Image (spheres, grey):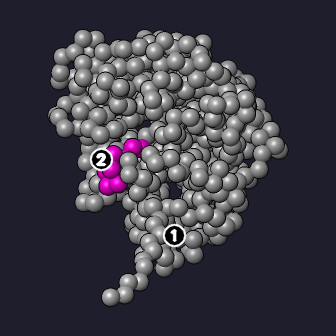
């Protein structure tokens, strides 16, 4: 321990009852079983980098509801090297991993792996490793076996479409995840500009100039430079950012203790800081920025205390506060600004009146809790993403049954995005897969984007020309960029 440990921390440890348990078996299950059996308040884990726990340990598991932080993820190196390679002949491979470079579309066409993984030098093929991941990945469920029930009832849509093509994989950008259920940490404001979380920092990446710039760093003290009613002038210290939203020149970051920090990207400093709640269950789950009917910018924050709060972004005043009987994981405002979709720790999703927060309708069908929602630009269609491994598409004109049930490959649907023209619906799983559906074909055809790593977020540029995917992995963390495919037709002309 360092000398900086406070006396209060020492007192805590002197009074703590420490329990130790040795378990043998699948780490993913045994660790979670031990937490449940011992009824612990704090779990401390340790292992050698390439020790016995050398497989896909993933924090989420059916029995553990109290563990909120993302686990230390086993990277690809852990899976594809055996002990002899790690301790002996694999030293050169390990060194080479530190020099993994970007991948361009030209290199990918020549056969290079889009993430730079040297499969030809490893003891497993990409195809075999993909099968292993599909077999071993544990989907987190609050309702046990919700995913299994969906697997039995639902079939996947036809894949093979190619709407977006790989353009570049950027290793300089290192997206990170703080909470395993919250994956809205990547936002594109143009086809060249992306904002994302990397540890304590909000970073800006320009794919045009290849410059990575730090916008805000929450590891130290962050305080507002403007004075607004309700703003915490003392600011925050070491804020853990759980969610993010960026639109035009506005940025809003939400924290684990109900913090909200607002910044104008065209000005220095932070404009506004507040705590939405001092409730123990205070985490900010989602933020959405939108244009109000009056012409200004507003944002909406969804919180674990059951609140949905609307703020204006001129004076940063609270405009509305709607309360629900369960934690709200995501909310989304309809294009006409009249309705809000509200999803959270409940099987049903709600459609509520944006003026008074009263429930207009409920949608039933999901088998677990939902963490994502989005509106089609036509204002009639919306989508919800759930831990039962499905995205369900709904039509306001008939909410008794979904328009489509879109099943993922191996995990919860953590993020959904409609393109601004309404042609595509992007659906992201927690890891390895992003699906792009053609709405004009009734969601019957999809493009499957296949890679390895946890997904920190997905974002389409406002003009729909670019799709960005944040990948979190100890070895292969990066930002994937896909560009929209175009079919150009030319007519011969005769003079």
**Outermost bottom residue:** 495
Q: Residue at x 73, y 33 (%)?
A: 401
Give the magenta part as a residue range. 186-193
Which quadrant of the rendered structure holds the C terminus? bottom left
Residue 230 vertical placement versus 327 (above, below): above
Residue 354 vertical placement versus 421 (above, below): above
Give the alpha-carbon distance from disc 2 to disc 1, as whole Å: 25 Å
Q: Residues within 10 Å of mark 1 (few under 14, many from 20)?
A: some
Q: Does any portion of residue 202 appear in the rendered image?
A: yes
Residue 224: say if magenta: no
**Residue to which mark 1 is pinned:** 113
Residue 187: say if magenta: yes
Quarter of the view holding residue 262: top left
Which quadrant of the rendered structure holds the N terminus? top left
**Residue to which mark 2 is pinned:** 204
Q: Does any portion of residue 9 appear in the rendered image?
A: no
Q: Residue at x 52, y 28 (%)?
A: 330
Q: Secondary structure at mark 2?
A: strand
Question: Is there a contact, CB below 8 Å, between mark 2 and mark 1?
Answer: no
x and y percentages locating residue 290 in the rendered image: 37, 31
As drawn, the label of residue 214 is: none
């Amino acid at each position: 321990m360092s000398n900086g440990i406070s006396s209060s921390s020492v007192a805590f440890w002197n009074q703590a009852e420490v329990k130790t348990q040795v378990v043998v078996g699948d780490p993913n299950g045994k660790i979670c079983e031990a937490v449940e059996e011992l009824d612990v308040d704090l779990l401390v884990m340790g292992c050698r980098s390439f020790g016995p726990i050398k497989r896909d340990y993933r924090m989420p598991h059916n029995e553990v509801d109290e563990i909120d932080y993302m686990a230390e993820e086993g990277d690809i190196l852990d899976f594809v090297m055996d002990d002899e390679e790690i301790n002996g002949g694999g030293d050169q491979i390990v060194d080479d991993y530190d020099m993994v470079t970007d991948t361009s579309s030209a290199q990918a066409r020549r056969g290079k792996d889009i993430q730079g993984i040297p499969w030809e030098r490893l003891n497993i093929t990409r195809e075999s490793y993909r099968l292993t991941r599909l077999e071993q990945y544990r989907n987190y469920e609050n309702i046990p076996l919700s995913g299994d029930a969906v697997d039995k009832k639902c079939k996947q849509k036809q894949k093979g479409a190619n709407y977006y093509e790989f353009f570049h994989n950027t290793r300089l950008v290192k997206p990170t995840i703080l909470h395993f259920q919250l994956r809205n940490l990547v936002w594109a404001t143009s086809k060249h500009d992306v904002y994302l979380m990397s540890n304590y920092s909000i970073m800006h990446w320009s794919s045009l100039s290849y410059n990575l710039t730090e916008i805000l760093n929450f590891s130290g003290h962050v305080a507002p430079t403007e004075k607004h009613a309700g703003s915490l002038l003392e600011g925050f210290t070491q804020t853990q950012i759980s969610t993010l939203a960026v639109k035009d020149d506005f940025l809003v970051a939400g924290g684990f203790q109900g913090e909200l920090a607002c910044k104008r990207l065209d000005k220095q400093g932070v404009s506004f800081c507040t705590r939405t709640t001092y409730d123990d269950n205070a985490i900010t789950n989602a933020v959405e920025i939108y244009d109000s009917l009056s012409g200004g910018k507003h944002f909406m924050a969804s919180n674990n205390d059951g609140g949905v709060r609307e703020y204006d972004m001129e004076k940063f005043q609270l405009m509305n506060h709607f309360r629900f009987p369960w934690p709200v994981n995501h909310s989304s405002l309809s294009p006409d600004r009249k309705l809000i979709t509200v999803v959270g720790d409940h099987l049903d999703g709600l459609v509520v009146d944006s003026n008074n927060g009263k429930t207009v309708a409920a949608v039933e069908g999901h088998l677990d809790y939902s963490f994502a929602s989005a509106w089609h630009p036509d204002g009639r269609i919306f989508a919800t993403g759930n831990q039962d491994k499905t995205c369900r598409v709904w039509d306001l004109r008939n909410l008794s049954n979904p328009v489509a049930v879109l099943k993922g490959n191996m995990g919860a649907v953590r993020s959904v995005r409609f393109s601004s023209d309404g042609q595509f619906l992007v659906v992201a799983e927690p890891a390895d897969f992003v699906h792009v559906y053609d709405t004009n074909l009734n969601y019957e055809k999809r493009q499957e984007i296949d890679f390895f790593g946890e997904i920190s977020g997905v974002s389409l540029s406002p003009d729909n020309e670019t799709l960005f995917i944040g990948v979190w992995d100890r070895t292969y963390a990066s930002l994937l960029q896909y560009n929209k495919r175009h079919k150009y037709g030319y007519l011969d002309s005769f003079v």
